[in-house]
Amino acid sequence: MPKVRVLVGTSKGAFVLTSDGKRKKWEVSGPHFGGWEIYHLKGSPADPNRIYASQATDWFGQVIHRSDDGGKTWDTVGNEFVYKGEPGTHQWYDGTPHPWEFKRVWHLEPSLDDPDTVYAGAEDAALFRSTDGGKTWEELPGLREHSTGATWQPGAGGLCLHTIILDPADPKRIYTAISAAGAFRSDDSGESWKPITKGLHSEFLPDPHAEIGHCVHHISMHPSNPEVLFMQKHWDVMRSDDHGEQWHEVSGNLPSDFGFVIDVHAHEPETLYVVPIKSDSEHYPPEGKLRVYRSRSGGNEWEALTKGLPQKDCYHNVLRDAMSVDTLDPCGIYFGTTGGQVYGSNDEGDSWEPIVRDLPRVLSVEAQALL
Amino acid sequence: MIRVSLPYHLRTLAGVGAEVELEIEGLVTPEGIIDALEAEYPMLRATMREDATGERRAYLRFFACGEDLSHQPMDLQLPGEVSRGEEIFRIVGAIAGG
């Protein structure tokens, strides 16, 4: 009987939710690292019991933990994140030069085939890699040292590298997204990078079509169709059919195309999920109705999924790393809210149930199918 | 023998109780205490001082003998009561955040 494990990072610790393949009854373990802010935790595709966790507080800085038994026990591993060379400056909020300073790890992306290799996306924006199970970390400086790096400016949440996608068809290809620098692609294992922002349009920029400065919230890809990328931008849901070379908008009939999460069905590469948020000034669902929107056509045509979700007086947000899918059949979908709920669907989003209702603010959700 | 108390989160991270005992040879300074703590408990590395500068983390405080030593130099020689183990060197998480 397959099992599912959902890893939840919150502002006050990590929680591990487990269920059998029916995904109706759940066990909740945690808080792990109680009181620590857990931006992200994620299991290795090559060894699901190998889980990496990023914990940080303003008091004690960054700590990385690793579990080798599916989250039952944890060991601290390396927390030395040092920028290579003379880091120089990026732009501060007021446009003045500001030194690059490591603050925290927003996202951990384990390798697709090696449990000891894992990438870390940092604030201030940089990409690090460990090849020894997290004991030591080395920056891949080509991204931060991109010729535009000195012009990158933080979004409201900081200059954070929050999205890392490893291409299953080409082990040398990596995608990253940075708020508010944009999206980047490397075709040489992270040595060099190019912005992939053609077709993006951001009204808040002096030049709305500029190469740099777009506030990309999240990018998702289906492993069977790796040339296709889907993006939830600050505003606009976007699609690229050529590895990010060109983007076009697929917001279609969404009630708002502002949002943070975007994810792809595990078995249907053209089925997408987003959670519309009212606006950049009002970070809650339109009309107080928490609705997941699903497109079965790769965008443009969206249907509201509401069964089991609060349809009045709901004013939570769903943050960028707080949605995930499992690979069972039918596909399961999970998302967490800033109000501490984690909702799950065991039928591709047709219906939802709260797995937990009263966790701290949910920062990240990652689902693992244990076959 | 030096006696040190850690804030709750660092105790749980290091798996220690309310008080830690350290042996330090020579001058006893805040920097030396943190060096000794990190050597004994590697999981505490960079949790008390900034990686880049080696300075005390902004939300931590160092107290001893009824004094706030947080704004003293990291190589300040601590009072004899601390180096003799008569007084605890207290590393405290600042009250912040509501």
Image (cartoon, grey):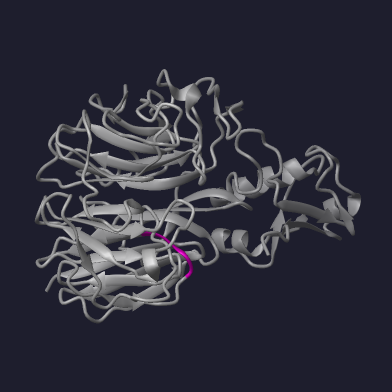
- Specify the farthest residue to the top: A147
Q: Is residue A84 visible?
A: no
- Span colored in magenta: A360-364
Quadrant in the picture for residue A103: top right
Taking A156 as reference, is A247 left or right? left
Vertical placement of A43 versus A7: above or below?
above
Taking B53 as reference, is A100 left or right? left
- Specify the farthest residue to the bottom: A25
Residue positioned 37% across, 55% down in the render: A41
Expressed as whole percent of the image width and height from the top left, the position of residue A307 reads 23, 76
Vertical placement of A125 versus A148: above or below?
below
Vertical placement of A339 versus A188: above or below?
below
Taking A307 as reference, is A134 left or right? right
| A32 or A252, nearer to the observer | A252
Which SS type dominates the magenta stretch?
strand
Quadrant in the picture for residue A4: bottom left
| Quadrant of the rendering where the N terminus of chain A is positioned | bottom left
Expressed as whole percent of the image width and height from the top left, the position of residue A108 reads 36, 47
Vertical placement of A314 versus A235: above or below?
below
Residue positioned 73% across, 47% down in the render: B33
Quadrant in the picture for residue A208: top left
Expressed as whole percent of the image width and height from the top left, the position of residue B44 reads 58, 50
| Quadrant of the rendering where the C terminus of chain A is positioned | bottom left
